[in-house]
Amino acid sequence: MTTVEPTVEAPGRDRILDEAATLFLEHGYEAASIRRIAEAVGMRAASIYHHFNSKEDLLEAILRRGLEVMTVAFGEASTATLGAPGPERLAAHVRAHLAALYENGPYTATHVTTFRTAPQSVRATIVPQRDAYEVLWTSLLDDLVTSGLLAPDTAVGPARLMLLGGMNASVEWFDPHLGSLDDLSELITRQTLYGLSNPMTD
């Protein structure tokens, strides 16, 4: 009697991306070899190349997906707070960005930790999409200046860099399993608006 082995479905592109993003985040881009990614997925290393031309191509797809998560989150926050007061709008966008970092898998966090050390060819292809996301934040901060929530002499460019940089850097020290993401969001929003002063005494 002939024994027929069950068919095992080959892991798809999304599974490869999931595992690669996790390994890039945990071990760094250089340390996470194609062989290591293939082992995590449960396939031969050569099979990775049926889905991606190179390791750089794989990283580019991960960085793009991370930016897509952030952009969608920004748009949803904008829709949800349309016509709302400035503080509420800022708080919603800060919370949305943090949610993109911590609540949507490793893609966005990998983008934050890996972009600066990614190969130049990868960075060059990602920069336009990254710039477009930053333009959304510039527009938001410009609106908050116009509305009077932020001081009229606010340097919006540096303010955007400080705000995004602070949120992104939190992946190096904040543990969402030990702290509240809502509390972190409130802290960042409050410090953006008032610094370390007590707004109740202003």
Image (cartoon, rainbow, N blue to C red):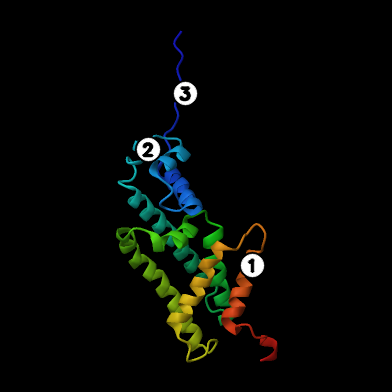
Q: Amino acid at mark 3?
A: Pro
- Nearer to us: label 2 or label 1: 2
Q: Amino acid at mark 1?
A: Asp
State if disc 1 and disc 3 touch (CB < 8 Å).
no
Q: Which mark is residue 182?
A: 1
Q: Is residue 21 left or right of residue 199?
A: left
The answer to whether one can see residue 134 in this image is yes
Image position, residue 158 (x, y; %): 45, 81
Quarter holding the C terminus is: bottom right
- Please name the residue that numbered disc 2 is placed on: 45
* SS at circle 2: helix
Residue at the outermost top position? 1
Image position, residue 48 (x, y; %): 36, 40
- Please name the residue that numbered disc 3 is placed on: 6
10 Å crowding of disc 1: few (<14), some (14-19), many (20+) = some
Q: How many marks?
A: 3
10 Å crowding of disc 2: few (<14), some (14-19), many (20+) = some
* Residue ID at (38%, 70%): 132
* Residue ID at (47%, 23%): 6
Image position, residue 17 (x, y; %): 43, 48
